[in-house]
Image (cartoon, rainbow, N blue to C red):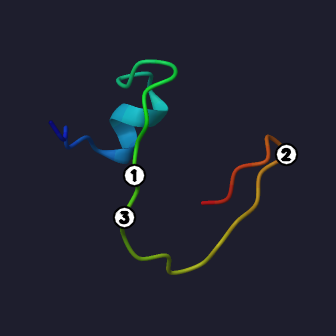
Amino acid sequence: MTKIASIKDVLQGGIAIGESVTVRGWVRTRRDSKAGLSF
C-alpha cells in the first residue's frame, strides 16, 4: 500500500527509518547542503 506524505513529514521523521519513499514534484532552483542533500 502506498502512503502519501509531505516533504515536511519526511524531514521531521514522520517516515520510519529504512522505509522506501518516492519524492515527486518540481524543482524551481536546486540548493546543495553540507549534509549531502539537494533541495
First in sequence: mark 3 vs mark 2: 3
Q: Residue at 44% of width from left, 22% of height from top? A: 13
Q: Which of the image's four quarters has the N terminus?
A: top left
Quadrant of residue 3 in the image?
A: top left
Q: Look at the numbered disc 1 and give the secondary structure of its residue.
A: loop
**Amino acid type shown at disc 2:** Lys
Other residues around mark 2 within 10 Å, as few (<14) / some (14–19) / many (≥20): few
Q: Disc number at residue 24?
A: 3
Q: x, y percentage for residue 23? A: 40, 56
Quadrant of residue 6 in the image?
A: top left
Q: Which residue is mark 1?
A: 22
Q: Look at the numbered disc 3 and give the secondary structure of its residue.
A: loop
Residue placed most toward the observer, 26 or 19: 19
Cα separation, mark 3 vs mark 1, equals 7 Å
**Amino acid type shown at disc 3:** Arg
Mark 1 or 2, closer to the camera? 1
The vertical placement of 25 against 38, above or below, is below
Cα separation, mark 1 vs mark 2, equals 22 Å
The vertical placement of 11 against 32, above or below, is above
Q: Are marks 3 and 1 in contact (CB under 8 Å)?
A: yes
Q: Which residue is mark 2?
A: 34
Cα separation, mark 3 vs mark 2, equals 22 Å
Q: Are marks 1 and 2 in contact (CB under 8 Å)?
A: no
Q: x, y percentage for residue 33? A: 77, 51
**Amino acid type shown at disc 1:** Thr
Furthest-front residue in view? 1
Quadrant of residue 15 in the image?
A: top left
Q: Residue at 25% of width from left, 40% of height from top? A: 5
